[in-house]
Image (spheres, coloured by chain):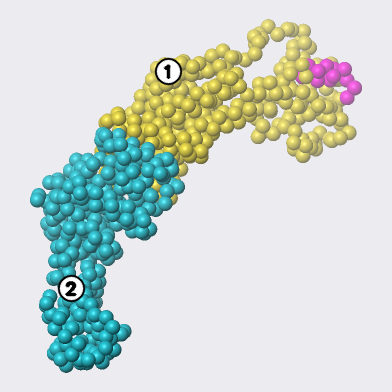
Amino acid sequence: MNPKRIGADLAVVARGYYRNPAALFFSLIFPLILIGLFGLIFSNTGTTTVTLEVLNENPHSPLVTKFLSALNNTTVVKVAVVPASTVSASGFSAWLGQNGDPVGLVIPATFTTNYSSGTQVNLTMFANPQDAAAAGEAEFAVSGVANAFNLAKAGGSSLIQLAGTVQGVGGTNLVYVDYLIPGLIGFSILTSPMFSMVDVASSYRKEGLFRQLSLTPLTRSEWLTSRIAWYILLTFAAAGIMLGMGVGVFDAHVSLNAGLIPYLVVGPFLFVSLGMLAGSVAPTPESAAVIGNIITFPMMFLAGTFFPVSEFPPGLQTFARVLPLYYVIDGMNQVMLFHNTMRAAADLAVVVVAGVVVFLLAVRLFRWRDA
Amino acid sequence: MPAAIEVEGLVKRYGGLTAVDRIDFSVPAGSVFAFLGPNGAGKTTTVEILEGLRQRTSGTVRVLGLDPWSDGAELHRRIGVIPQEFRFFEKITPREAVEYYRALFGSSVDPDEVLGRVELLDKRSARFDQLSGGQKQKLGLALALSNDPEIYFLDEPTTGLDPHARRAIWNVIRSIRAAGRTVFLTTHYLEEAELLSDRVAIIHHGHLIAVGTAAEIIAAHGGPARAVFEAAPELATRLTARLGVAARASGGRVVVDLAGPHDALRVLSAAEESGLPWSSFSTERDTLEDVFIRMVGEMDDGALKGESAP
């Protein structure tokens, strides 16, 4: 390994990138768009109020009015009363679907009389399972208010109460975008080198650039090292952009510490080598793209990039743990959110071992010259 | 003079196809060696084996005393190569490319001086993908120059280039030879080989069919020198009768083979004595191209007859 040659090659790669707007877009602008998009979609989850369509079959009752205003006071839902003349209870579900409303509640005609006489009151709720968040929030609000009314009827008072708002797991004041950042950095660590290296490996071979380089003192491991160095630089830039945007625009609270740095180094090391390996074993540029996609796509979605792996069904969770990107993202989660140093170190060890194995295989299997 | 390249019994097979079949030759250091052959004759395979880019099936190959395949890393520091249709990184400029090579080889050439030698100085800041075919080829030559190699391998360096670019590359080849370096040149331009090279080898169907200086090959394989008149066919009849040698008439020309180097006057006298008119008289002999076309043509005819024989 000659640092001067690696440096000279790195300069060529960097200039090539700088002069190729498409490559720069994917490496730097794409992460910006990703964090912007996901940040916008998820950052307001806690503050939006769900509109709850209420079919009131017990109109003109002060008790019902009190119940509905209690629902409004939760700020979780906003009650929209549907007059009983508009739709019947049996057609309410279909009516909600036609109007695109996610949740609905039926107040039965017996509400006031039953409550007053101490008989059970049956509320009926409808929810669109696709909008699970809205359904959950509405159900939470309705049952909370119902409990308060039950307590009041029994003459009791709430002794156990949640203090203030619900706090984030792993640290105080964590917001959704905090959980997104490690995944999106991982996404960038994976996709930027994988797509590019698979293409480079096969097209350089086809165009005779590897033969040309083989006629110089540059070695294959020096060449690959220079690419790895370049993608480490790009990863730092992309991570910086995403963290800057997350903290500056979406008010993220992730902890920025030196523990993140090893992942930004070892991650690109692993995926540049893996891309090179995939491109080298493929006989043609077309098959290289296919092999690259087969390796990349499951990781893009199943390694904890956009959705926490803990939400997956057990079989898929097991599969996720086979994917090397899982350990990159889980490690970054441990460092940035949960401060679990032991688990972070174990994750890092997995990535280092995988990286070394794949690097050595790639150097061995990619050919400068033909037999 | 020591040999820069020595090849003995070189064979290269691709599966069942024998691309190069037991060829021998040597190239003295400091000379220009032209390797000729029709397309598909085995030229590029041979040159790639010499460059260490391709593994041979059998035989001995020594380039600067090294085995090109197993000592490739060392050899590549000491040779310069321009492949057929040189390609490089799309976004690099010629000046950056030479600087890159200078850093890789640890050499101390001046990039502008090298680009000046190949007449590419005015394009030093253009991107590679904006260069013309000739300019790309010149950059290939500039990169080969940038580590001051002992042997240059030029694989059809002027194929498809305009006459101006071709002449520029010829001038560089001449300057390389003047500096005492060795050049191994493959080409299918016979004129180029005759003009630039000290020695020539002709390869066909993987066999070497002639090796030597252009004059030696013409003397050994060319036809006899000829006297040529521009005259009516009648002169041919008279000359045949007078000289006892068959004179041929075609296209307003009458041609008589000369018996030796000092035979022209005898033919001219016979023509004078015939009293018939002629408008011009000259002597001519085969060029390397004539010999090449005849030898390759004869071999193909022979091969065809051989194939059709029971």
Seen in the picture, residue A134 relative to A259 is either above or below; the reply is below
Question: In screen coordinates, is B8 left or right of A132?
Answer: left
Count residues near mark 2 (Cα–Cα under 10 Å), then give few for <14, some for 14-19, many for 20+.
many
Front position among marks 2 and 1: 2
- Which chain does the numbered disc 2 sit on? B
- In the rendered structure, find residue A146 and report the number of the disc placed on it: none
- In the rendered structure, find residue B222 and report the number of the disc placed on it: 2
Q: How many marks?
A: 2
Seen in the picture, residue A350 relative to A26 is either above or below; the reply is above
Work out whether residue A371 or residue A223 is closer to the camera in this orientation and state it.
A223
At 42% from the left and 18% from the top, the residue drawn is: A259
The kind of secondary structure element at disc 2 is: loop
At 44% from the left and 20% from the top, the residue drawn is: A260
- In the rendered structure, find residue A259 and report the number of the disc placed on it: 1
- Amino acid type at image mark 2: Gly
- Amino acid type at image mark 1: Gly
Chain whose colour in the figure is yellow? A
Residue B43 visible somewhere in the drawing: no
Mark 2 → mark 1, Cα distance in angstroms: 80 Å
Residue A34 drawn in magenta: no
Position of the C terminus of chain B, as image quadrant, is bottom left
Seen in the picture, residue B83 relative to A263 is either above or below; the reply is below
Count residues near mark 1 (Cα–Cα under 10 Å), then give few for <14, some for 14-19, many for 20+.
some
Question: In screen coordinates, is B224 left or right of B126?
Answer: left
Colour assigned to chain B in the rendering is cyan
The picture quadrant where one finds residue B197 is: bottom left
Residue A69 drawn in magenta: yes
At 27% from the left and 31% from the top, the residue drawn is: A1
Q: Which residues are magenta?
A: A59-71
